[in-house]
Amino acid sequence: MNALVDKLKKLRAQAGAAAAPANAAHDDTERLRRLLQRRPEPRAASLPAERVALAGEEIAPGLRYVEAWRPYEAGAPVLPPRWHDAHAVARERFVCFDTETTGLAGGSGTRAFMIGAADWHDGGLRVRQLYLTRMAGEAAMLDAFASWLAEASVLVSYNGRSYDAPLLATRYRLARRANPLAGLPHVDLLHPVRRAYRGRWENCRLATIERQLLGIVREDDLPGAQAPAAWLAYLRHGAAGRLMQVIEHNRQDVVTLARLLDAMAVDASPESFVATMSRDNVTACA
Amino acid sequence: MHTDLATVIAEKIPTRRDPARLLQALEQRYADRITGKFTLPGRDGRYADLPPDLPPRLRDALRARGVERLYSHQAQAWASVRAGSNTVVVTPTASGKTLCYTLPVVTAAIESRAKALYLFPTKALAQDQVAELLELNRAGDLGLRACTFDGDTPGDARQSVRLHGDIVVSNPDMLHQGILPHHTKWAQFFENLRYVVIDEIHTYRGVFGSHVANVLRRLMRVCAFYGAKPVFILCSATIGNPREHAQALIGDAVHAITDSGAPCGEKHVLLWNPPVINPDLGLRASARSQVTRIARASIRARLKTLVFAPSRLLVEVLTKYLKDVFDHDPRKPARIHAYRGGYLPTQRRQTEQALRAGSIDGVVSTSALELGVDIGALDVVVLHGYPGSIAATWQRFGRAGRRRQAAIGVLVATSQALDQYIVRHPEFFENAPPEQARIAPDHPLILLDHIRCAAFELPFVATDAFASVEPRPYLEVLADAEVVHREGERWEWIADAYPANAVSLRSVADGNFVVVDRTDGRQTIIAEVDFSAAALTLYEGAIHMVQSTPYQVERLDWEGRKAYVTRTHVDYYTDAIDYTQLKVLERFDGANAGQGACRHGEVHVVRRVAGYKKIRYYTHENIGYGPVALPDQELHTTSIWWQLREDVLEAAFASRQAALDGFLGAASVLHTVANVRVMAESRDLQKAVGSGDGAWFATRDAHGRGQWRATDGTLARGGERHAPTVYLYDNYPGGVGLSDPLFRVQADLVRDAIALVAACACKAGCPACVGPVLAADEAGSAKANAAIVLALLESV
């Protein structure tokens, strides 16, 4: 009914929950606060920072890197996402990736705070993850991810064509960097999965598919929707516990992508892969 | 195109259109009704050659469209813009403003594929503009890509507009919600953005204008990120301060071109007061009857006639009256059209085309035709009532006038006091300069909204300013609310929210109502009505007219935003009875004001439709009432108010009536001086007089005398004691923050008000001071009573 009043109410409610940073009292700020009819709340005692160690190593200020390698029961040396007029692609060229972001609002204000990628390397599956411990690490994260991609790379994602890739394109643009994803072929498994299994299970979310199709059961998983809050909790209060769960969640997501690619090579119709890629891209990877 | 045979034939017939003859006839027959008459002399055109540096293909395209030379102001605009100056062009309607920006924009597109962004206040104007550009494009095979980008642009077309549009035509709301928050998708567009064109800048005033100024600040911030610094080309109808207003909007120096080189015929303005029909009661004939009479005469004289009516209802009523005369043969194409908001866009486009083609003779419109929709030139404009400002009056009159022919504008007064004042003081109208457009872009709450949106678009770094504003305090408030996060010297957006969606540039927009015709089992949408007008026009029992065809509202689904109507054949129309009432919710602060008190706080404003009247066509007799049960229209906002104690009033006034009249007068003066103080549009700041407890409110009767009404609208019987209170409140949900600064200068406001009343040359009161007063008075004039109230409130 009344957008501004609602907003003021919301602001008040948020003030109750928020721990205001201790700023030197600023006249203008005080005046604004009065105008908004809200007082700065007495600062909530800082949550005792959980003594949880951060995973991985810091490779740049504000950026940490986690790497894991696992043996992979070797399938075919090439994977045939059987698109038309194209040769099968050497397994090593696939990069299965997933981002964790600050939300779903879209636009230039939404960012990725974690990028995970799985690829076949040294005869097994390598999982590499980047995550921010401060916002200032973003440029280094984007550069590091770009360095993982080569001209011959083929991207694999779940809904990444409409979500992760455009979001990263925005971040590269804002960081004034070339977008390393541009022009790479991109297999978005959401579409072939939908075609192959629509109506068979309750939905086509990645967690459902991996449970039903691959028999993967996650233990102690943090739902993806809670990822933004987990990162903010670390950013604001240094509480790392939930953030470590997000890393685990993201790791499992990209491993699932790799296994799903294998499974889909058997199950899905060739046409459904074609639909996930533009024809230019198909030719490019021929 | 709508060029039918009738049009072709009509053009072959030698016309005897001569406004001068109509003018003569009116003056002879109705000398006693014409209270003022003045003539604006015609002017020859002043021309300039097409600029030598115009690209040959554009030159050819212009010639193909019949443009061999420019008006002097178009040539000046070309020189100014090409020199890289921000430029505002302020010339009358139909003086070729469009070419002022088309020439440099198209030239830059041809020469270097430079991009341009056009902003219009409405989608209809944007579509007109693109149609015109495409015609020019075809005429010269310019290879130009011009497209609209607004809420109607389909998703799959958007990508193409972003990448390939040379000229993108949009509106401020879309820039705010759809373009800036996604600026990275528009990177190529912004990198090459050379010109920003903003037309109709006089509509960007008050709260809306303050929002738009901040959207432009955000636009410039995004442009700077992409290394672009576009030149602004602005256009405005006549206002008192075009250059200052343009500079306030874009926050930069602007070169003003105000001297039109377009020729125009002389223009005759008549002020018209309906005749007195009952001398005992001082009753005058209705403006409706007079407007109909003048329009009939004008259309019979084969003059193209445009009637402006103040409400959608009156548009329909007047259309019916004219159709009854001119459109009684249903086999022939209609000669009279109605035009207003709420019609479907296709209907309006048809009327616009018919006007341009000259195939209709009369149009009745609301202010919707005040803007620069291309309808060609007309001969006669008739206004039903004073539109409320000098600028709007001239803008409507500006619709009349062919290049070498005289045109007529007639202002017909209603019985309202302000109208009566205007027609009885023709010298006031003739000499008054047009109003100034005001905005307050640095208003804290509006700024907070836009700094929030700006932080979403690009992070703030410590040294960044937001235009001329230091953003730090705002960022701290946003950090408190945890929507931005501060890290070192950077403030970055962190919340999972899309802030532009929560900020509406045009106050409350709650979704339109659709009108569904269910006659004979149909289910056809015949009209749309915006939320603010729904309660007044779509109550159950209402006669809702579309092109003067009456439909009756059978059911109103308030939640579902639908009104179900059926075709009807009644001989009456309906008019809502509504009341506004105010109640104090919370006092923030208070101070002494002379012998009274001034307070500042939160109020609850309720607008209630209590019922409706049935009014018979032509006789206008009231033939019945109906009840209305609708939710109240509510507004929580902030207000400042003044009160005097009962004993103080008893001592100072002979009667309670005098005290009430004094308060109503004081409210008018305080409202005026407050508007000047906070540079607000009068629609943003409202005034009211009520009782302190919110149980009663005061209105003026037909003679300008105060009367108390209960909250259900019934008149007080008299004898009650209601402590009169003057309220000034923000007419904006949540308050736009006007009343807080007003409270801080409340003593100055009272002093200014006293000075204004003292300096006014009128005897008993006039619209320029205490408001319109017609009743001759025994017990002291309204002016004197207002002066007493103000003196009691003065802090010495």
Image (spheres, helix red, strand yellow):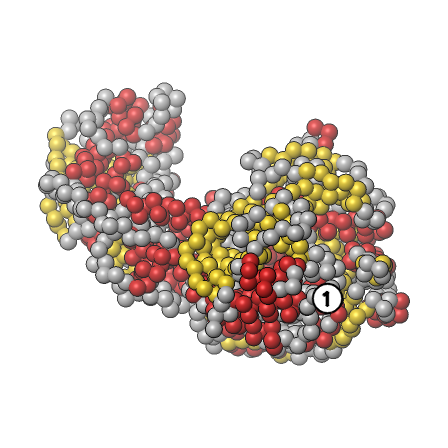
Front-lying residue, A268 or B288: B288
Report the number of numbered marks.
1
Q: Residue A253's spot in the image, x, y percent?
A: 24, 33
Q: Residue B445's spot in the image, x, y percent?
A: 41, 57
Residue shown at the point (45%, 64%) measured from the top left: B592
Image quadrant of residue B58?
bottom right
Q: Is residue B722 left or right of residue B406?
A: left
Residue shown at the point (22%, 43%) measured from the top left: A233
Q: Is residue A94 left or right of residue B274?
A: left
Q: Is residue B39 left or right of residue A24?
A: right
- Is residue B276 among what the camera can see? yes
Front-lying residue, B19 or B416: B416
Q: Secondary structure at mark 1?
A: loop
Residue shown at the point (21%, 32%) measured from the top left: A252
Answer few, some or many: residues within 10 Å of disc 1's Cα (few below 14, many 20 plus, some between 14 and 19). few
In the rendered image, the vertical position of residue A76 relative to residue A95, given as above or below: above
Q: Residue B287's spot in the image, x, y percent?
A: 78, 58
Q: Callout 1: residue from which chain? A: B
In the rendered image, the vertical position of residue B273 relative to residue A284, given as above or below: below
- Is residue B681 among what the camera can see? no
Q: Which residue is mark 1?
A: B777
Q: Residue B512's spot in the image, x, y percent?
A: 57, 43
In the rendered image, the vertical position of residue B593 relative to residue B629, given as above or below: below
Residue shown at the point (71%, 78%) measured from the top left: B43
Amino acid beneath label 1: Asp
Front-lying residue, A76 or B688: B688
